[in-house]
Image (cartoon, rainbow, N blue to C red):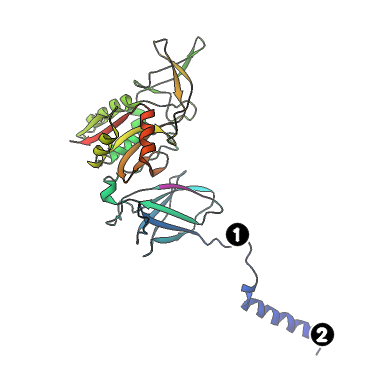
Amino acid sequence: MPRHVLLFCFILLFSVYLSGCSSVFPAKEGEQDEGIKVLTVAFGSREPIPNTKVIVRDLDTDKLITTAIGNSEGELTLHLERNRRYLFIPSHEDFKNEETANVSKVIKIKDDTTYVVLETYNQEDKAMDVPVVLQKPELPHGCEITAMTAAFNYYGLNLSKIKMARKYLPTQPLINRDGKRIGPDPAKAYAGDPANVNTGTYAFAKVIEKAAKKVSKDYHADIQVQNLTGASKQKIISTVKQGIPVMMWVTLDLTKPQTKEGWYIEGTMKKMSMYRNLHVVVLTGYDDGKVIVMDPLHGYVSHSASKFFASYKDLGKQAIALKKH
């Protein structure tokens, strides 16, 4: 047989071998993404919750990415673009099972992320299903008004955080005058612009109390605004267990308050320091030494109750509750 015919037969046979035995060659790195496993578990017990619906939204664009339902083991697999932040929402309001409440978690999916665990909460313990309202990207320094919006929306008002900020949050700019930085008393007005990453600061409970009362009146909401500033831990927990959401002033990571140079309060010679890590969240529940909060930066998270209330104390025990008449 001519050599060229033998060579052709050899190539043909080798090709057939490759097609049937391609598994002997390793796949190229990154060629196939096996996806990210998502496990939904119960808060506290960490028991998997079967057949839970999970909605995933792109945090930066608010675009709906996917909707999926877990299996009988509480697991599902998702294929998501890497190095992006997503909002995971298990047991959404239009598909609640009897065990879980509508919660969410912000997670950045990195190159090496393979597993995500979502904690959800027993309705009996959590008591409230305050809707998740995130302050970013529109209100990078608007945790107070965002928390207020979420608390009102718990009662079915469907308010917009942007409208609340523009129409109901009293603000006053920080200005330079005669070499001094002048601004408002944070107990009377928000200093700066919550929508501006460079000029936004914060406001104290009295400002949000005033804003909330006006919202309740304008929307005929029949919601009582209670200033619980100074209330004890027991009083706050008792209020939440009655199904009343409480906005609370704490620090971002529950560490000690950090301050920097602030401003002179308008019309006085009093100079105040400025908090660098002040934050406002909505307390929605308490369970076995842990608090459950709707955080305008992260959605639903849980914290050690002792650390949480220590931070509440450090920020002057400021709290506002919204109670349905």
Front residue (pair 212, 256)? 256
In the picture, which quadrant includes the C terminus?
A: top left
Front residue (pair 12, 32)? 32
Amino acid type of the residue tagged 1 in the rendering = Gly
Residue 203 x/y as whole percent: 37, 25
In the picture, which quadrant includes the N terminus?
A: bottom right
Residue at 35% from the left image edge and 23% from the top image edge: 170
* Residue 212 in view of the camera: yes
Question: What mark, if any, has residue 251 been given in the picture?
Answer: none
What residue would you read off at disc 1?
30
Q: Earlier in the sequence, mark 2 or mark 1?
A: 2
Q: Nearer the viewer, mark 2 or mark 1?
A: 1
Amino acid type of the residue tagged 2 in the rendering = Arg
Q: SS for tag 1?
A: loop
Residue 93 x/y as whole percent: 30, 51
Q: SS for tag 2?
A: helix
Is the stretch drawn in magenta largely helix, strand or loop? Answer: strand
**How many other residues sit within 10 Å of disc 1, few (<14), some (14-19) or many (≥20)?**
few
C-alpha span from label 2 to label 1: 41 Å
Q: How many marks?
A: 2
Residue at 33% from the left image edge and 52% from the top image edge: 92
What residue would you read off at disc 2?
3
Give the residue furthest to the bottom.
1
Compared to 32, does 279 lie above or below?
Answer: above
Give the residue furthest to the left.
325
* Mark 2 in CB contact with mark 1 (< 8 angstroms): no
Give the residue furthest to the right.
3
Compared to 60, does 54 lie above or below?
Answer: below
Q: Using residue 107 as the reference point, say whether residue 212 is left or right of it.
A: left
Segment colored magenta: 105-109
* Residue 146 in view of the camera: no
Residue 198 x/y as whole percent: 50, 27
